Structure formats: structure tokens, C-alpha cells
Image (spheres, rainbow, N blue to C red):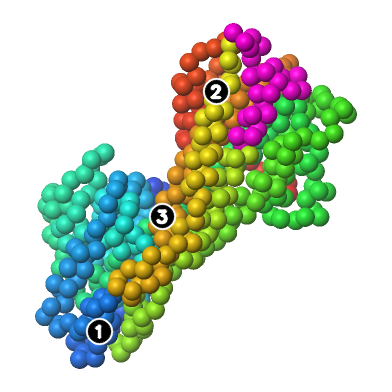
Amino acid sequence: MVFKYGIDRLDLATVNGIADGSIQAELCAEAIAKINQSRSCVDVMAASSKAIYGINTGFGPLCDTQISPTETALLQKNLLITHAVGVGEPIAKAISKLMLITKVHALSQGYSGVRLEVIERMLKFIELDLIPVVPEQGSVGASGDLAPLSHLFLPLIGEGEFWAGNSSVPASEALAQHGLTPLELQAKEGLGLINGTQFILSHGITALTKMQYLLNLADVAGAMSIEGMQGSGSPFRPELHQIRPFAGNIEVAARMRRLFKNSQNMASHTGCARVQDPYSLRCIPQVHGASRNAFHHLKELVEIEMNSVTDNPIVISSEEALSGGGFHGQPLAMVLDYTSIAAAELGNISDRRCYLLLEGLHGLPRLLTKASGLNSGLMIPQYTTAALVTENKSLCFPPSADSVPTSMGQEDHVSMGSISGRKLNQILGNLEKILAIELMYAAQAIEFRRPNTCSDLIEENHAIIRAKVAKLEEDRLLKPDIDAMITLVKTQALKVDFAVNV
């Protein structure tokens, strides 16, 4: 498969494939023609005496200040330099690469007036793995992600830094090593580069990629906990969900049924006296399902955004560049905040299941050890899940509900979507740790149900866990066990993707 920038449609799998090199991407003749046509329109407008925002005027509150053709190049250079005011730690190199890929796709649609030479240089950066260093803080997500995009494109003019392993190297040095000379930006190009939502978008792509696995893993963890508790499979029967047909609920219930299929352990307590399980077991379809619904909403909007043009103004013809608000981050900011709550709730209910497994109910020993008293067993890791859950709750404040005016009031309502995207990824990082601890608990609980066996899927995952973390017989240092479980989660080593009949 060869993806054609500016022509084909990106989706989550494709953008990740381009980023990891499994999918080839190129500029085709059709896209090149659109890029060149858009550029020719800008050249006409730049030479005009008519003031056209972003092409022969200043920016933001200086939009009514006309710039002469001889000052155009300096204006574009100054734009990048003055807006590169990001602070804090750099974002992950992988996110910077996604920013480059999605920006190339947006510019290649032929509405931005950026020269072919500039886009080809960006593609050269991707080809040579010259990925710019971008600070994580400084964007308010209004005229797009001005500060991070400025840092992303400083290397085009020989400024800024590239990643070199785990450190950085001045862009000027790296360009010289590859025989590349800095570019001189022309009319509209600086604005076309730094207006846009690629910072917010790339954090959304990263979050979706991680959350897709964690949603599936949460179902596996919940099923293993139910097996350990010898809970009921009745709440997952299709009849319950056909009459309240939320897509996420139906999907989770079907996955749970598959996870319990042919489980000897589940069959062993059929007809027992227990009537109902606590909500953290019984309501898994409703809670996990609601989080899935949020995931699908975010995925829908992110895939719209990654195929959109989000800079400003938009080149319509050689007479008109349409100025509007296509760079505003609100469409993504709000759903990123909503998805943050959805991710946090997966951790919240997981922690409750950890607590249940320690209570010594339904044939399980207290603290999941037969020698409690002298031994604390698995008492304390739940303190960690409790701390992580509360940290996630504190991260759920929606930045999109806030706005601080900038640019002397010209940009008087901003989205803060960059913060929304960063916080969602923080929450997902904490969720990985919470689910890792639940899986460790559930694997221990299942040991007390032997010789009963569980379904093939649960036994396979139990074996993966046991290859890294042994059954707890008496107290030992648990930090290595927890770290091993977190590594299993982060490397996506557990089997969570399987076919179901909805």
C-alpha cells in the first residue's frame, strides 16, 4: 500500500503505519499540482496592493498592518522565531513525528499556499528520521498550536533542535551533516506552518492507540477478577443488552461471554446461593461500555481532523484568501476531556475490583494469602491503585471549560486543547499501572480456584503473567513483580484481541 498525501484518507491504522514505516507514503502528481496551484495564487496576492490577512499583512492584532513584498521573507522568519516560546519537557519523539505526518497531509490538500519545496523538506525530515524537539507546554489551542508548531518547523530555517537518540542536536549541525541548507520562507508559509491543530491531534492519535489496547485489557482484567471471585456470568447475557442497546455495552458483554466460554471454574458454582455481585463486577458492560463509547467518539473526530485543513487563511483563488477559525482546537478539546473521564473510570472500577479480591470473601483468603498475619500478602499494592485513581481524578478537570484571552484580545476565546491531550495521555499512563496491579491480583486469586480451569483465553493470559510473576506464597519484595506486570501491559504482551459474536 502506498498512501498519497493530500489525496487519500488517513485513519488511525494508516497514520500509525506511516509513522512506524510499515506503510509507504508519497506526494503524487495530483497532490503536487494542487500544491503548486495554491502557491501560484499566493504569489499573485502577495504582489497585490490589496491587504490580505497573513499574506501581505501582520498577524493577530497586527492584521491591519500591511507588509511590503521586500519584507515578506523576514516577516515569515520572524513569525517562527517569535512564536517558538514553548517550555517544559519535550514531547515524545513519536508524537513530534505524528505532527509532521499530519501537517504534510493537511498542507498537501492545496489550500495553504505553502511551496512544494517546503513540503518536500518536511518529507525529507521524516525519511531521514530528523524529528524536531518540541516542548510540551505553551499552546492554548486557539490559532492552532502556535508554539509547538513553531518549534516543529524551526529546523526548516536552520534553527531549533532535532532528536539524536535520547538527547538533542542543533538543527544547523544535523542539516549540514545531511547536506541540507536552511530554507527561506516566502509569503504565507510561516502562517501556514504554525496555524493548525497538529499538536492536539497527535496527542489524540497517541491516546487512541494506547486506549484501544487498554479497553480490551480492562475486559480481560475484569473477567479474571470475576473468575477469581467466582462471580456470576448472568450480567453479560445478551438479553440484558439487547433492550438497552448502547454499542459499547453490547461489545463488552459479548467479550465477557467469550472470556468465560467453556470455563470449568465458572460452571463449578452454577446455582450457588449468591444472588448479585457488587457493581464493579456486575456492571462491567455498563462502565467499560461507556468508556468504549467515548473512545469511538474521539476516534471519529480525530479521523475527521487528521483529514482536515486547519490553518488560516485558506487560499480560495488568486483573489481571495478566506480568514476564519478553522484552526480552533475546541472540536477536539471537548472530546479529549470527555475521554479523559472515560479512561479514569476504567481505573476507578479496576481499583474497586482489587479491593474486593482482598476482602477474603467467597472462598478466597484475606489479602490473597493463606498466611495472613505474619504475611501482609497483597494488601499494599491496592494503596498504589487508590493513589493512582485519585491522581487521575485530579487530572479530569476539563481544560476546555476554561479560556484565557491572548493576543491583545484578538484571540479572546481559546480551547486549551493541548492541555486536554496531554492530560489524557497522563491518565492512560496511570491506567496502565492500575490494570497491571489488578491483573496481578486476579492471577493470584485464580490460584485458589485450582484445580478448576478457566477459559482458554484466561488461561493463556494467566500463563503469560506467571512467566513473569510467580504465585505469592509468602511475603517478598513486590516492586519487581509490579514492574514486571507494568512492562507486560506497556508492551501489550497480554492477549486481549479476539473475535466475538455480538
Above or below 382: residue 132? below
Q: Residue at x 59, y 45 (%)?
A: 345
Kindly identify the amino acid type of the residue bearing the numbered disc 3.
Answer: Ile
In this rendering, would 470 be left or right of 490?
right
In this rendering, would 301 be left or right of 253?
left
Question: Which label was assigned to residue 419?
Answer: 3
The range drawn in magenta is 350-374
Kindly identify the amino acid type of the residue bearing the numbered disc 1.
Answer: Asp
Pointer 2 residue = 380
Residue 421 seen in the current view: yes
Q: Which residue is drawn at 21% across and 83% down?
A: 65
Q: Could you tell me how far apart the alpha carbons at marks 1 and 3 are, in whole angstroms?
A: 31 Å
Q: Could you tell me how far apart the alpha carbons at marks 2 and 3 are, in whole angstroms?
A: 32 Å
Query: Would you identify the image quadrant in which residue 153 lies?
Result: bottom left
Above or below 252: residue 51? below
Q: Which residue is drawn at 74% across and 36% down?
A: 278
Is residue 195 part of the magenta span, yes or no? Answer: no
> Which badge, 2 or 3, is on the more N-terminal residue?
2
Across and down, in percent, residue 229 comes to 72, 27
Across and down, in percent, residue 256 comes to 71, 39
Pointer 1 residue = 64
Q: Is mark 1 on a helix, strand or loop?
A: loop
Judge the density around disc 1: few (<14), some (14-19), many (≥20) Cα neighbours within 10 Å: some
Across and down, in percent, residue 310 comes to 39, 70
Q: Is mark 2 on a helix, strand or loop?
A: loop
Is residue 371 part of the magenta span, yes or no? Answer: yes
